[in-house]
Amino acid sequence: MTDLTTREFVLATDLDGTFLGGTDEARAALYEWIDANRDSVGLVFVTGRDPEFIVDLTRGTPIPTPDYVVGDVGTTIARVVDGQVEPIAELEEEIARTWGDAGPRVRQALDGHPGLTVQDTEFRYRVSFDMDPETYDDSAALKVSEMGFDPLISANRYFDVLPRGISKGPSIRRLVSHLGVEERRVLCAGDTLNDLSMLVCGLPAVAVGNSEAPLLEALPEDAPHIWRAKADGCAGIWEAIAAFGLHSQARETPNAL
């Protein structure tokens, strides 16, 4: 298991719009900086994407390979070994127990619901839908809650059904605690509502400049641990690293950032 306790700084970042966001120059600069400092920088992807997507994303590309992954909107907690995502069983026990075998029941309950189209991929501990905001009937959220699960809408086009109490925030905290990493050395980064639980979980956090309005509106006003970046995507991440002084090179802003 990769030891992150020796790393000066750990970035726990969403992908779409965040670590994959910003200009080509900004992304290249941040990725190169991370790769050049892997002895002092840890990387965790905290994403709604599934493990297969994450493996394909980093294979043969300049995108740095993460040390760990909190995927599937917090329902997967895994290490990355030789480019493969390996779930950490002891960290997923509560998730598995809370979800049970709910997938078929959730799909049946929301079958034909206005504005929701179930995604083809069958995830282990969640059910995901594409959402049409024009035709979506918000009674779906109440239906899901009454069934004992948590509904989550993000980017105004995705509707996820998650085990109650499980999301990106609780899962990244569970991973950080398990690894023994000091919380003050971790930066959580995101841009949509499915990142809210991660940004408000108490770890240093940044909402990048291109964050959707509903996320910014949901963030607490008086929260000094949350940086509201002006720059988009990767440049916004670096802005927060520098603002919080999370790395000894934080004042040496990479070119293009």
Image (tube, rainbow, N blue to C red):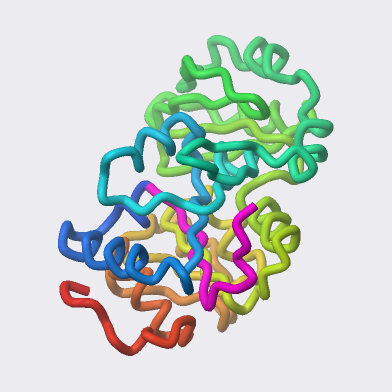
Q: Would you place residue 67 above or below residue 240 in this image?
A: above
Q: Would you place residue 218 above or below residue 221 in this image?
A: above
**Secondary structure mostly seen in the magenta stretch:** loop
Pick the front one: 176 or 232 = 176
Q: Would you place residue 158 above or below residue 240 in this image?
A: above
User: Where are the magenta residues, as a range?
Assistant: 1-15
* Quarter of the rendering containing residue 135: top left
Looking at the picture, how far across and down is residue 179, in whole percent? Answer: 70, 61
Q: Residue at x 77, y 31 (%)?
A: 96
Pick the front one: 57 or 147 = 57
Looking at the picture, how far across and down is residue 120, in whole percent? Answer: 47, 15
Looking at the picture, how far across and down is residue 162, in whole percent? Answer: 66, 35
For residue 109: magenta? no
Q: Would you place residue 23 above or below residue 5 in this image?
A: above
Residue 205 is left or right of residue 176, and the answer is: left
Q: Residue at x 50, y 33 (%)?
A: 50
Q: Residue at x 74, y 33 (%)?
A: 149
Pick the front one: 245 or 225 = 245
* Quarter of the rendering containing residue 122: top right
Identify the image quadrant of the C terminus: bottom left
Looking at the picture, how far across and down is residue 64, in whole percent? Answer: 36, 53
Q: How many marks?
A: 0
For residue 6: magenta? yes
* Quarter of the rendering containing residue 161: top right
Pick the front one: 10 or 111 = 10
